[in-house]
Every structure is written in structure tokens, then in C-alpha cells.
Amino acid sequence: MPICSPPPPSSNRPSPQCPRSPEGDRHRTFEPAGDRPVRPETPSGPTRAAAGQETGMSLLATPHTLDPVVGIDAFKGAMGRLAGAVTVITAGRGPEARGLTATAVCSVAASPPTLLICVNRSGEAHDAIARTEAFCVNVLADRSRTVADRFAGRFGNLGAEKFADAAWSSLVTGAPALDEALVAIDCRLAETVEAHSHTVFFGTVVGVRLGAALPPLLHFDRAYRTLS
Ligand SMILES: Cc1cc2nc3c(=O)[nH]c(=O)nc-3n(C[C@H](O)[C@H](O)[C@H](O)COP(=O)(O)O)c2cc1C
């Protein structure tokens, strides 16, 4: 049973399964109506129109089932086979800086240059991204495993403490850019979509700093890897 069907292309009305939020297209919610309330307190980013694009069909037009067909462990095992580049996503400045280790980063479009990130709403970086309407994706080299662990919370550091012991600068938005990153990709928030526990943040790329093409840090089968 679909939980969020788009309206017909000719219709200007929201579908019964996927009502338009009070903010219109500013902020989309990927939850079945009636099952869970829309979180009005969650900050939203600028509209897609503000980013210079027309709003088209729902980004989440694919029908989804309400009945889980695999358990969480099976899902995590499956996703573990999806080798991913390890990044640290940052937002904010100085004592307000926040960051998390993330593999859920995906290129969306080249024109305008757009990527997306998926961030758990319970993490401390989430609200910093929403509040500043900017973030920087720092793609890690294999030599940066300690940085990855620190921003994954494995050393117990909190808040801006995570930024100690590495060199940071900034590009355009002011979000921290890791000097030793393979590449730092600076983004302005273009749109947000809530998806269960996570928010999908779409960013327009406004700055890129390429570092040396060193062996990358990858995550595969629940462990760090690299290319040899
Ligand atoms: C390899 C790896 C990939 C991760 N990918 C993501 C991700 O894409 N999105 C996300 O929200 N959390 C991801 N996490 C988890 C966050 O890094 C972790 O929950 C976060 O640092 C905790 O933040 P907190 O200290 O604010 O609670 C990942 C962790 C690891 C180790």
C-alpha cells in the first residue's frame, strides 16, 4: 500500500496520502498521514524555487509499503555491502560548529551542482545544518580514520570538541572544511525532506577544494577499508 503517492501531474492539489505541509513546498515529509504527525518544530530550508528551480513531482513518488519485509539487521547487512566513501559533514562556526561521520552522501545533479545527505535528526549536527542552512561535506582519506571515529562519537567527544586535533578552514559558507580531506564540498541548503528518523538535506554546491588524490577511506561490511 503506498504511503505517499504524488498527485496526478495535472492536479494542483496534494494527494490524500501525501498532504502538502503548511509551509507548502518548503519542507516535505516522508511519513504516512495519520500514522505520525509532521514535526512542525523541525527547521526547514529554503524552497526549491528559491534555489532557482521549479518544483516537480514529489521526490518520493515511488510507492512504499507500510509492512516491513525485512528486519533491521537484514537491512543493515544489506547496506553494509554498499561500499561507501566516508565523509565528515560539518556545519556552524567556532563553538557552534558541529559535525558527524556519514556515508549517506549522493550526487544529485550537475546543473545546478546539487548533492544530498541523509542525517539522523537525533544527532547534534542535524540542527546546526538546518539553522545555518549550510554544510560542508569533507571526503576522508584513509589516513583520517581517527577523524572518522571522533565524528562518529567513538571517543565520547561532544559538540565543537570533535574539531580538536585536526586543521580546519572554511570555503564560502563558513562551515568547517577539513584541510586534510580528499575534497571539501561546501553547500548551501536548497531543500529538506524528512524521511522517518532522518532528514534528507539537498545542498547546492557553492565551493570545492580539492586535496591530494590519496587512498580514500571507505566503509564496507561494517569495517573501514581502502583501495590498494
Ligand atoms: C561509517 C559511518 C557512517 C555513518 N553514516 C551516517 C550517515 O550517513 N548519516 C547519519 O546520520 N549518521 C551516520 N553515521 C552515524 C553518525 O556518525 C553518528 O551517529 C554521529 O556521530 C553521532 O552524532 P552525535 O555525537 O551528535 O550523537 C555513520 C557512522 C559511521 C561510523
Image: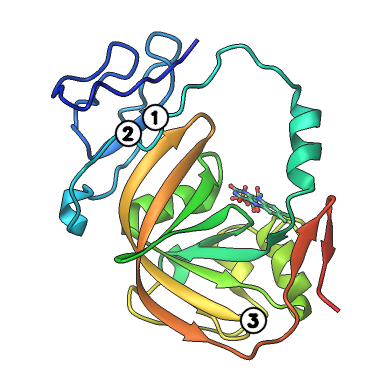
Horizontally, residue 118 falls left or right of residue 206, namely right
Does 169 appear above or below 107? below
- Say whether residue 139 is left or right of residue 198: right
Whole-Å distance between the Cαs marked 2 and 1? 5 Å
Element class at badge 1: loop
Q: Is residue 46 above or below residue 85?
A: above
Nearer the viewer's eye, disc 3 or disc 2?
2
**In this figure, which residue is indicated by the disc labeled 2?**
58
Question: Which three-letter amino acid code belongs to the residue tagged 2?
Answer: Ser
Q: CA distance from mark 3 to mark 2?
A: 40 Å
The furthest residue to the bottom: 212
Spot occupied by residue 27 in the image (x, y as percentages of width and height):
29, 37
* Residue 204 spot, x, y in % from top left: 33, 63
Q: Which quadrant holds residue 223?
A: bottom right
**Of helix, strand and loop, which one carries label 2?**
loop
Please state the total of marks drawn on the protein image: 3
Quarter-wise, where is residue 85 in the image?
A: bottom right
Mark linked to residue 61: 1
Is the residue under label 3 in contact with that under label 1 (CB below 8 Å)?
no
Label 3 vs 2, first from the N-terminus: 2
Q: Residue 124: x percent and y percent?
A: 53, 50
Question: Which label is found at residue 166?
Answer: 3
Quadrant location of the C terminus? bottom right
203 and 130: which one is in front? 203
Q: CA distance from mark 1 to mark 3?
A: 41 Å
Which residue appears at 64% of the width and 56% of the height?
A: 103
Q: Residue at x 32, y 41 (%)?
A: 43
Q: Position of residue 44 (x, y in %)?
A: 29, 43
Going by the numbered disc 1, the residue's amino acid type is Ala
SS under mark 3: loop
